[in-house]
Image: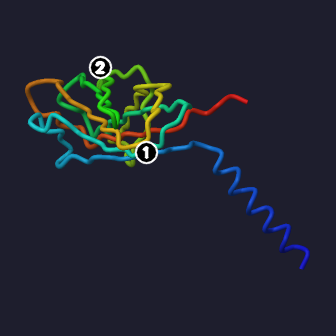
Amino acid sequence: MKKTPLLLSLIASVFLFASCGRSVVFDEKVTFQYNNWDHNNKSQIFKAHLKGSEKPYSVILELEIVGTPNVDKFFSDFIITSPNGGVTKKFVHFNLTNPKEPFIQGDSPNVKILQIIVFQKKYFSETGIYTLNVDQFSNKFDNRGIRSLRMIIEKVKEKS
């Protein structure tokens, strides 16, 4: 009988330790048909309901690449519209053939994920729905080889 409280304490400790890791508040992925971000499909819009905070968040974009894309570079504007209509805009550039950041290995040897931290410390001070828009303007053709676009917003870890 004495082992049960010890076991429950151990399980509770594991849950507590696991919850102290990444604190993701938004994570959404758009997958493109035929691994092709169609040129005519310029914008990908995400809607995130965020609770206003005086603490910063990281905003991360990921492109999942299959094989060798038909473009070397991928350019886009990243636009955040707050619930009250305020706009923040930032230029985003993925180098698909020679990325500066190491890529993340995907689900097969032919798949890699390129990740860019768009904002290391972005403040979302209002509570409500934020519109996060990725407007691509890489070239005049389709972007074959781009399987998906993922957006992640997570709380910035505070240093102890």
Name which of mark 1 and mark 2 comes first in the sequence. 1
Question: Does residue 92 appear in this view?
Answer: no
Task: Determine which residue is flagged by label 2.
Answer: 91
Closer to the camera in the image, 82 or 78: 82
* Mark 2 neighbour class, 10 Å CA radius: few under 14, some 14 to 19, many 20 or more: few
From this view, report whether residue 137 is shown above or below residue 61. Answer: above
**Which residue is painted at 54% across and 37% down in the image?**
155
Callout 1 secondary element = strand
Task: Determine which residue is flagged by label 1.
Answer: 26
Q: Which quarter of the picture shows residue 23?
A: top right
What is the x, y in percent for residue 84?
A: 33, 34
* Mark 1 neighbour class, 10 Å CA radius: few under 14, some 14 to 19, many 20 or more: some
What is the x, y in percent for residue 101?
A: 43, 24
Q: Which quarter of the picture shows residue 36?
A: top left
What is the x, y in percent for residue 33?
A: 18, 49
Q: Which quarter of the picture shows residue 111?
A: top left
Name the amino acid type tagged 1: Phe
Question: Does residue 65 appear in this view?
Answer: yes
Colour scheme used in the picture?
Answer: rainbow
| Label total for image | 2
Closer to the camera in the image, 67 or 140: 140
Q: CA distance from mark 1 to mark 2?
A: 21 Å
Name the amino acid type tagged 2: Phe
| Quadrant showing the N terminus | bottom right
**Which residue is painted at 68% across and 57% down in the image?**
15
**Which residue is painted at 29% across and 31% down in the image?**
85
What is the x, y in percent for residue 159?
A: 68, 28
Residue that sits furthest to the bottom in the current view: 1
From this view, report whether residue 86 is shown above or below residue 132. Answer: above
| Quadrant showing the C terminus | top right
Q: Which mark is residue 71?
A: none
Callout 2 secondary element = strand
